[in-house]
Image (spheres, rainbow, N blue to C red):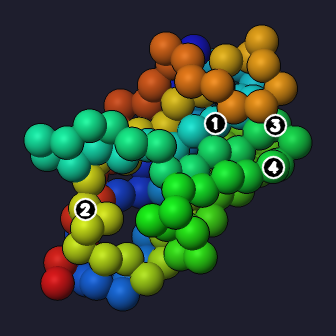
Amino acid sequence: VQLQASGGGLVQAGGSLRLSCAAIRSMFRIGAVGWYRQAPGKQRDLVATITSGGSTNYADSVKGRFTVSRDNAKNTVYLQMNSLKPEDTAVYYCNLGDPTYSDYQVSDYWGQGTQVTVSS
């Protein structure tokens, strides 16, 4: 299955963006998903997760500002990002969770990433 993350862009501090993660050219049903981000020169960090049942978890740095959700009819997972800060600048990736687990566990299936740039 191939994932596509989209919705990134340039926004001023305090602004909002909504990222999407969808399976492209596939009838594969997306289960648990993790959103990650990677800033230049830094490791890729987990930002938020959502299970197939809709349970969510967030990194402390984004709690209260980011919301992960899913639309099963559209086979798409979203990351709504509000009150963006310059330190949120990174390439954002979605990862399809390992289907052998009920909660989110990282797998080898990654979207290609979408750039988010927050100006001060």
Residue under numbered circle 2: 89
Is the residue 119 above or below the residue 72 in the image?
Answer: below
Q: Amino acid at mark 2?
A: Thr
- Between the C-alphas of marks 2 and 3, the distance is 28 Å
- Could you say which quadrant of the image residue 64 lies in? bottom right
**Marks 2 & 1, CB-CB < 8 Å contact:** no
| Mark 4 Cα-neighbour bin, 10 Å: few <14, some 14–19, many ≥20 | few
Q: Are marks 4 and 3 in contact (CB under 8 Å)?
A: no
| Residue shown at 67% from the left, 18% from the top | 98
Depth order, front residue of 107/3: 107
| Image marks 1 and 4: residues in contact by CB distance under 8 Å | no
Q: Secondary structure at mark 4?
A: loop
Q: Amino acid at mark 1?
A: Val
Q: Which mark is residue 55?
A: 4
Q: Residue at x 35, y 58 (%)?
A: 8
Disc 2 + disc 3, Cβ < 8 Å = no
Report, in whole angstroms, how far the alpha carbon at label 4 lies from the one at label 3: 8 Å
Does residue 1 appear anywhere in the picture?
Answer: yes
